[in-house]
Image: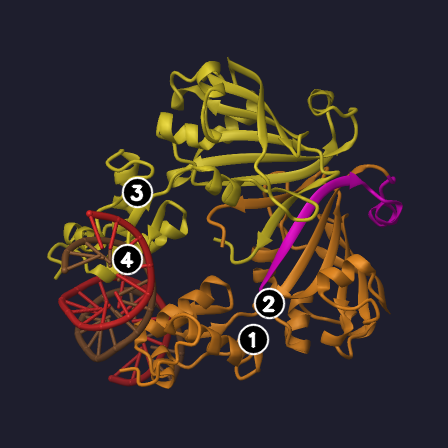
Chain colours: A orange, B yellow, C red, D brown
Amino acid sequence: MRDTPRRSRGSLYQEVMRQLIDDIQRGVVGPGDALPSESELAQRFKVSIGTLRRAVDGLVADNILVRQQGRGTFVGRQDRDRFMFQFFKIAARDGTLQFPEVRLHAFQRSRPNEIQARRLGIQLTDAVFCIDNVLALGGRPVVHDHIVIPAALFDGLNRIGFAGRTGTIYELYQSDFGVTIVGAHERIRAESMAMSSASLLGLRAGVPALRIERLAYTFNTVPVEFRVSVVDTREFEYVSDLEAPV
Amino acid sequence: MRDTPRRSRGSLYQEVMRQLIDDIQRGVVGPGDALPSESELAQRFKVSIGTLRRAVDGLVADNILVRQQGRGTFVGRQDRDRFMFQFFKIAARDGTLQFPEVRLHAFQRSRPNEIQARRLGIQLTDAVFCIDNVLALGGRPVVHDHIVIPAALFDGLNRIGFAGRTGTIYELYQSDFGVTIVGAHERIRAESMAMSSASLLGLRAGVPALRIERLAYTFNTVPVEFRVSVVDTREFEYVSDLEAPV
DNA sequence: AAGTGGTCTAGACCACTTG
DNA sequence: AAGTGGTCTAGACCACTTT
C-alpha cells in the first residue's frame, strides 16, 4: 500500500523511529508527555500497527520511550530511577545501590583543555562550564566528580540555577535545556589519588583510586558531557553487566 | 488456533524461547549448528511465523542465536569475535582493542575459599579448578587472571587439556563440557597491587591496579566461573558502555 | 464501557545466499 | 531456481487502566 518508495535509508520502521525521535528533539512532545495511541500513530505514519509497534519497541529498548499497558506510551524522563538504573554504577560491597547525596564544590565558566575539547568535539576557544561535585554515600564522601559541558548547549546556566535544581543533573539538562542524555561511554583505570580529590574526600593523597572518564551523549551519538569521577573504592565498587551488548 | 491453553508461565513466544534454549542445553543442536528454518520451527511449535520470529529475536538479542540472511539461524559459538565483543573489556588508551596473548602460569585442583564458594553457589568441600593466567597486550604482560570453576561441571579437565585448547577459554567450556557462558557480572575497584600479581606482571608491589571480580554464568543465571583480574592500567583501560541496560 | 498497550495469526513480498 | 531470513500488512483477541 506504500505509494512512494521513501525508503531513503533502511527500512520503514527505522524511518518511523527517526521521525519519532525528531518529534522529541524538536519538542513536539516533551519528557513525560504521552504519545498518541499506537493506532493513531500508525494512521499518521501510514504504516500498519505492527510496523508502528516495531518502531516503538526500538525506542523503548533505548529507554527513550516508556510503555505502560492500559495507560499509554510516554517520553522517557531523566528521573532518579532512570539515573540509578542506567548511569549510576557505584554500589556497596554487598551489592546494594543507594542514591548519592550531592554537594556542589565549584562552578565556573572557562575554556576546555585539549582532551576535553577533543572528546566533546569543540574548539579550545569555545566556552565550557566546569563543575566539581562531591557525592556522599551513607553519609561519607566517596566520589569526586569533575564535569565539563559546552556552554553553547546550556545557555544561561549559572551556579544558582545549577545548585537549585530539584532532581538529577541529567534531569536539569533535559527539562531546562532540552538536552536528553541517552547513553555514555566510560573508561576506567586505577591511579594514585591526586591531592585535589583526596582533600575533597577526606583522604590522604596517593591512595589507590578508581578514575572513571565518562563521555555522555544525546541522540545521534552527539557528545554533551565529559565527566571524570574519582572514586574511593575501599567500601564501594563499580558494577558492570556483560550481557548482550547493544 | 491454540487448542490447549499451555500458557503455564508467560506468553507463547516466551514458551517457545524456553523450548529453544532447552534444545540447546540438551545438545539437540550444538554450537555452530544451523536451526531448522523458521517456517519449519513455526510448524513444529504450532505457532505463527511471527511468533516464532519473536522468540528467535529474543535469543538473538542475548547472543544465544545468530541469524544470517539467506543462510539460516545458527547456535552462537564462543569464538574469538564473541569473546572480544562481549567479554574482553580492556582496551588501549587510544581505544583500540586487541586479542590478548594468554600464558598459563598455574593449574591446580583444590577447594574454594568462602567467597569463591558463596559466589559459585557450591560447598566449601566441593572441588574446584584454580587457574592462573597472564595476559599480554602488545607483547607486555598487563592482566593477571585467577580463575575458579567447579570441578563438577568440568569433569576430566586437566592442565594438558586446558593448555592445549585451540580457542578461547569460554570456547573450551562450551565445546568440551557443554557449558555456554551467556553473561557475566563484574565488580571493579582500585587497590595496591599484591606481590603475587606484581611479580607475574613484572611490576613492583603496591602500584595502583584495577581489580575486577567477574562472576560468569550460563543459562538461567547459573554461576559457572569466578574470576579475579588484576590489571595494570598505565597503558590500558577498562571500557564500558552505558546504553539501555538489559 | 471505552481506550490503551500486549499477544498472535496467516498470509504477502523483498533481500540475500547457495546450488 | 530454490531456500533462507527480513519487512510489512490487516486484522483478531487479551490484559490492563481509567472513567
Per the rendered image, the range of residues in magenta is A181-205
The kind of residue tagged 1 is: Pro
The kind of residue tagged 3 is: Ile
Q: Secondary structure at mark 1?
A: loop
Query: Closer to the camera: disc 3 or disc 1?
Result: 3
Query: N-terminal of the two: label 4 or label 3?
Result: 3
State the residue at coordinates (57%, 82%).
A26
Disc 4 and disc 3 on one polypeptide chain: yes
Disc 2 and disc 3 on one polypeptide chain: no
- As measured in the structure, the alpha-carbon distance from the residue carrying label 2 to the one carrying label 3 is 36 Å
State the residue at coordinates (63%, 64%).
A217
- As measured in the structure, the alpha-carbon distance from the residue carrying label 4 to the one carrying label 2 is 33 Å
Dot 3 surroundings within 10 Å: few (below 14), some, or many (20 or more)? some
- As measured in the structure, the alpha-carbon distance from the residue carrying label 1 to the one carrying label 2 is 8 Å
Residue A78's mark?
Answer: 2
Q: x%, y% of residue A46?
A: 34, 83
Query: Closer to the camera: disc 4 or disc 2?
Result: 4
In the picture of the structure, the residue carrying the numbered disc 1 is: A31
Q: Secondary structure at mark 3?
A: helix
Dot 1 surroundings within 10 Å: few (below 14), some, or many (20 or more)? many
Label 3 marks a residue whose chain is: B
Q: Nearer the viewer, residue A164 or B126?
A: B126
- As measured in the structure, the alpha-carbon distance from the residue carrying label 3 to the one carrying label 1 is 38 Å
Q: Secondary structure at mark 4?
A: helix
Residue B53's mark?
Answer: 4
